[in-house]
Structure formats: structure tokens, C-alpha cells
């Protein structure tokens, strides 16, 4: 079997595994919907009120997208590695031509497809229930690229967490510990002006910051986005390489 065939076979198996887990499907698609309804339709933004949600509704589009772009790959890839390890499946995979990099790439492709669909749902809901509007420009065609690259990045990080954690519960705890601070401290829902100046270098060090800046430039501000995409792509390549190395060969 060719490399493409091996990746395709593993990706199909991973996709079927996802659709059989109804809880995973529910939280992937409907948990972000709940957040949009609560914060977008019920709490609403107050552009002149100061504090949280003081920016126009369009400013927070990257934050809503970041919920699935960040949480889903971290927990799904990490949990998949934990399940494979607990079931002794890596020992079986070690007897096949499928490499660790191919295994991670296959699961990354599945996550890109799933999260891409979830992101489209979220974007439509945000535009439907809030006052947010999109800047209509050719740059909108790059928005799916930002989503795909960010998903790949966090799939790589999820693989590292899955390799380091000793159980599926450990993976969930580790992914939430990493994801929650990143979600709110990466220029998504909390603006840099609300943070102390000494903390801003940490914001710049977050990979999610470049996703938020780039997608906001495309959807809300109409500014430059190419530099953010370049940084995000370089980080994704690095995280995927480390993640592929971290995938267990045997246990």
C-alpha cells in the first residue's frame, strides 16, 4: 500500500470512530453553539460600556472560532492516543507500514474536516444571532486556511499531551489546563488593553494569538494577515513534527 493509501485508510477509520461517539459529536458541534447563544445573543456586546465584551460583535468572531479550533483537536487527538495505548493498538500498528507521522497526519486531516464544518456552523450562527458582520473581500477565501493550519497545530500539541498523560482522564485534564488560559489570553475574548503590560509578551507567545489576529484582520478589521499566517504555519509545522515524534511506537 502506498503512503497515500495508508493515510487514507487510517483517516477513514478515524472518521468512522468519531461518528460512532455521539457524545464527541455533540460537544464538537453544540458546545460552541451554546457559547455563542449565551455570550452573543444573551449577554451581547456593549461597545461603549468598557470591560469584557466592550468591542463590537465582529471583534469576537475569532474567539468563537477558537473554541473548536483549540479544544477539539487537543482533546480528540490526545484521547485517541490514550485509547490506542490502553488498548495495545500501537503494538499492532508497529507491525504495519503505517508510520507515526502518517498516523498523526491522518487524524489531523479528519480533525480539519470536522472542525471546518463546525467552524462554518459557528460563523453562520454568530452572523445570525449577533450584530456581527463580515468584511466582504477576497481575503475571506483565506479564512479556511487559517482554520486548517490552526487545527493542525493543536493536533500536534494534542499528540504531545496524549503521549505525556497516563490516561484518558489525564489527557482531558491536561488539555483543559492548556486550552482555557490560551482561549482567554490570546487576543480572543480579552483585549490586550485589559491585561497588564508585563503580560503582553506571553500573549505574543501564544500560537492562538496569531490565529485570532489573522482571522480578525480578515473578518473584522480588513488589515494585513499574511504575517500571522506565516507564523502560524511555521508553528504548526514544528508542533506536528514534535507531535509525530511523541506518538508512541509501542507501550
Image (cartoon, grey):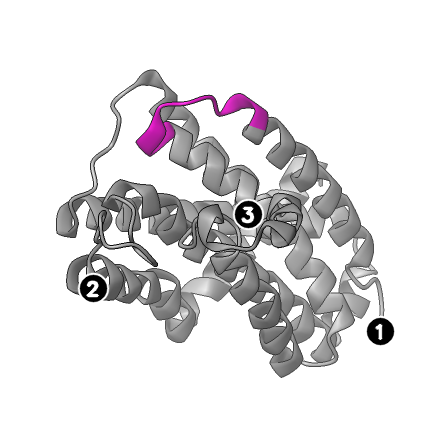
Q: Main secondary structure of the magenta part?
A: helix
Q: Which residues are magenta?
A: 218-227
Q: Which residue is mark 3?
A: 208
Of mark 2 and mark 3, the one earlier in the sequence is 2
Classify the position of the C terminus by image quarter.
bottom right
Q: Is residue 225 above or below residue 157?
A: above
Any mark on residue 71, and which? none
How far across and down, in percent of the image, does residue 226 sit? 53, 22
Q: Which residue is mark 1?
A: 251
Indicate left or right for 106 with 145 as reference: right
Of mark 3 and mark 1, the one earlier in the sequence is 3
How far across and down, in percent of the image, does residue 1 sit? 71, 41
Indicate left or right for 241 with 124 as reference: right
Q: Is residue 188 above or below residue 133?
A: below
**Marks 2/3: CA–CA distance:** 24 Å
Label 1 secondary element = loop
Name which quarter of the figure residue 127 lies in: top left
Q: Residue at x 38, y 28 (%)?
A: 218
Amino acid at each position: 500500500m502506498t503512503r497515500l493509501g495508508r493515510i487514507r485508510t487510517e483517516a477513514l477509520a478515524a472518521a468512522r470512530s468519531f461518528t460512532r461517539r455521539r457524545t464527541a459529536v455533540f460537544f464538537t458541534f453544540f458546545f460552541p453553539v451554546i457559547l455563542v447563544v449565551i455570550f452573543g445573543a444573551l449577554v451581547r456586546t456593549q461597545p461603549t460600556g468598557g470591560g469584557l465584551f466592550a468591542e463590537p460583535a465582529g471583534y469576537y468572531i475569532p474567539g468563537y472560532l477558537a473554541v473548536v479550533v483549540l479544544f477539539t483537536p487537543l482533546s480528540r487527538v490526545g484521547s485517541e492516543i490514550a485509547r490506542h495505548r490502553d488498548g495495545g493498538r500501537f503494538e499492532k500498528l508497529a507491525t504495519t507500514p503505517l508510520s507515526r507521522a502518517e498516523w498523526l497526519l491522518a487524524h489531523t486531516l479528519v480533525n480539519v474536516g470536522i472542525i471546518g464544518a463546525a467552524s462554518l456552523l459557528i460563523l453562520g450562527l454568530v452572523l445570525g444571532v449577533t450584530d456581527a458582520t463580515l468584511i466582504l473581500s477576497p481575503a475571506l477565501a483565506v479564512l479556511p486556511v487559517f482554520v486548517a493550519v490552526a487545527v493542525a497545530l493543536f493536533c500536534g500539541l494534542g499528540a504531545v499531551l496524549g503521549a505525556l498523560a497516563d490516561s484518558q482522564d489525564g489527557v482531558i485534564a491536561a488539555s483543559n489546563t492548556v486550552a482555557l488560559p490560551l482561549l482567554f489570553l490570546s487576543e480572543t475574548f480579552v483585549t490586550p488593553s485589559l491585561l497588564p503590560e508585563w503580560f503582553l509578551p506571553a500573549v505574543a507567545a501564544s500560537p492562538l494569538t496569531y490565529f485570532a489576529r489573522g482571522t480578525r484582520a480578515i473578518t473584522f478589521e480588513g488589515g494585513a494577515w499574511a504575517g500571522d499566517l506565516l507564523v502560524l504555519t511555521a508553528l504548526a509545522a514544528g508542533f506536528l513534527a514534535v507531535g509525530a515524534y511523541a506518538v508512541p511506537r509501542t507501550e
